[in-house]
Image: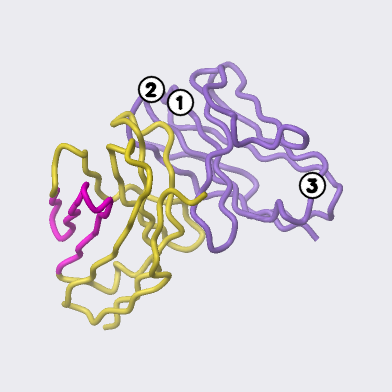
Amino acid sequence: EAGVAQSPRYKIIEKRQSVAFWCNPISGHATLYWYQQILGQGPKLLIQFQNNGVVDDSQLPKDRFSAERLKGVDSTLKIQPAKLEDSAVYLCASSLVAGRQYFGPGTRLTVL
Amino acid sequence: DQQVKQNSPSLSVQEGRISILNCDYTNSMFDYFLWYKKYPAEGPTFLISISSIKDKNEDGRFTVFLNKSAKHLSLHIVPSQPGDSAVYFCAASVSTGANNLFFGTGTRLTVIP
């Protein structure tokens, strides 16, 4: 069974630039999550989708972050414009409607 | 506000000995707890979980203990192996659906051969 795929694996941008991350969840998983993990901290949930609807985006900084899940499968997370404090690993996870979350390898973002 | 806390950022243990990783939480609504293991450049992988109706769950070398009154849980690894060297995250949820996980800051375990 293929795991959660994410791309790119690494990204370096300058502040005020835009960046987008892509996630392909495990086939059949209805729920998709984006987490932000800042160095030295645990992952923090940014947004949760069930199919293509948003379940929880209370921790998403909506002035600069946006996310969508096309047709209830792939998802993209965008940051526009990026700030220095956005430097982190962005993790995507998926699960069945309820249950264990499976994580992708993450995208390491460095904002200079 | 950090609702799940792992106060030991690192732990070193000799191979073959017991590793004990600790986790505390503040939210009394949490009733499902998980441990994830993370290797460098990989995403966290699920290790073991426990529901609040239990005080112990065992899976091979890994055992998780839950003390609800103290809002404390611990992960025991016996015997520890060099391949167990990783960062371990404690996570908690308000339901067994585990949809909204709150993570601790992690403990880096090093098992010395």
Can you identify the residue that label 3 sits on? A82
Q: Are marks 2 and 1 in contact (CB under 8 Å)?
A: yes
Q: Do the residues labelled 2 and 3 touch (CB within 8 Å)?
A: no
Measuring from the top left, give residue A51's x and y in whole percent.
50, 18
The answer to which image quadrant residue A99 occupies is top left
The answer to which image quadrant residue A2 occupies is top left
Can you identify the residue that label 2 sits on? A97
Q: On screen, B80 above or below A24?
A: below
How many numbered marks appear? Answer: 3
Q: Please state, as top left, top right, bottom left or bottom right, where the C terminus of chain B lies in the image.
A: bottom left
Could you say which chain is coloured purple in the image?
A
Q: Which of marks 2 and 3 is nearer the N terminus?
A: 3
Asked whether residue A98 is drawn in magenta, I would say: no
Dot 2 alpha-carbon crowd within 10 angstroms: few under 14, some 14 to 19, many 20 or more? some
- Chain B representation colour: yellow
On screen, residue B94 versus residue A58, left or right, reads left
Can you identify the residue that label 1 sits on? A31
Secondary structure state at the residue bearing disc 2? loop
The residue nearer to you, when weighing B18 against A68, is B18
User: Do badges 2 and 1 share one subunit?
Assistant: yes
Task: Tell me which amino acid carries mark 1.
Answer: Thr
Measuring from the top left, give residue B67's x and y in whole percent.
19, 51
Q: Are marks 1 and 3 in contact (CB under 8 Å)?
A: no
Q: Which residue is drawn at 52% across and 22% down?
A: A55
Dot 1 alpha-carbon crowd within 10 angstroms: few under 14, some 14 to 19, many 20 or more? many
Magenta segment: B57-78
On screen, residue A35 versus residue B79, left or right, reads right
Please tell me whether the stretch drawn in magenta is mainly helix, strand or loop: strand
Task: Tell me which amino acid carries mark 2.
Answer: Val
Task: Tell me which amino acid carries mark 3.
Answer: Ala
Measuring from the top left, give residue A35's x and y in whole percent.
55, 42
Q: What is the C-alpha distance between the residues marked 2 and 1?
A: 6 Å
